[in-house]
Amino acid sequence: MFVILRTITVSEGSADQVVERFSQPGSVVAQQPGFVDMQVLVKQVRRGEEEVLIMFRWESEQDWKNWEKSDAHVQGHRNKAGQPKPEYILNVSHAKYEVKAVTTAVDETKPTV
């Protein structure tokens, strides 16, 4: 499994706007081969800048690369070219990870063999 993390730092009170943008039903990325899921997390802070983490999980790095090169992805970025980013976005960073181990919950209601 392959994970892309996008960290978006926003001004105080703006995290919900980022969450809304990445929570739209019918996302084009969700229809891509190899896409597993996307999770949107908001760091709990009392006040000040807020942080939104978007985690995209893919079956493989190649599936993610195919999405990056796809017409849908490229066209989406072309449509936004030249538009200023919203003022509430202070910083955006990206990171790529390869999943090496996964632990899942044990379901004690199922009999073991």
Image (cartoon, rainbow, N blue to C red):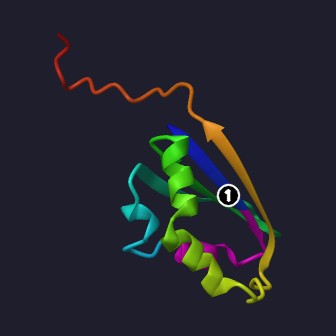
Question: Magenta includes 21?
Answer: yes
Residue 21 vs residue 94: left or right?
A: left
- Which residue lies at the image location 78% right of the left edge and 88% below the top edge? 84
Amino acid bearing label 1: Arg
Residue plotted at (70% across, 78% down): 14
Say which residue appears at 53% left-offset and 51% top-offset. 64
- Position of 44 compared to 100: left or right? right
Rendering coords of residue 17 (x, y %): 62, 79
Quadrant in the rendering for residue 11: bottom right
In the image, 51 versus 32, the foreground residue is 32
Q: Is residue 96 above or below residue 102?
A: below
* Residue receiving disc 1: 6
Say whether residue 56 is visible: no
Helix, strand or loop under label 1: strand
* CA neighbours of label 1 inside 10 A, class few (<14), some (14 to 19), many (20+): some
Q: Is residue 113 above or below residue 96?
A: above
Magenta stretch? 8-22
Most foreground residue, 85 or 50: 85
| Residue lying at the far top of the rendered structure | 113
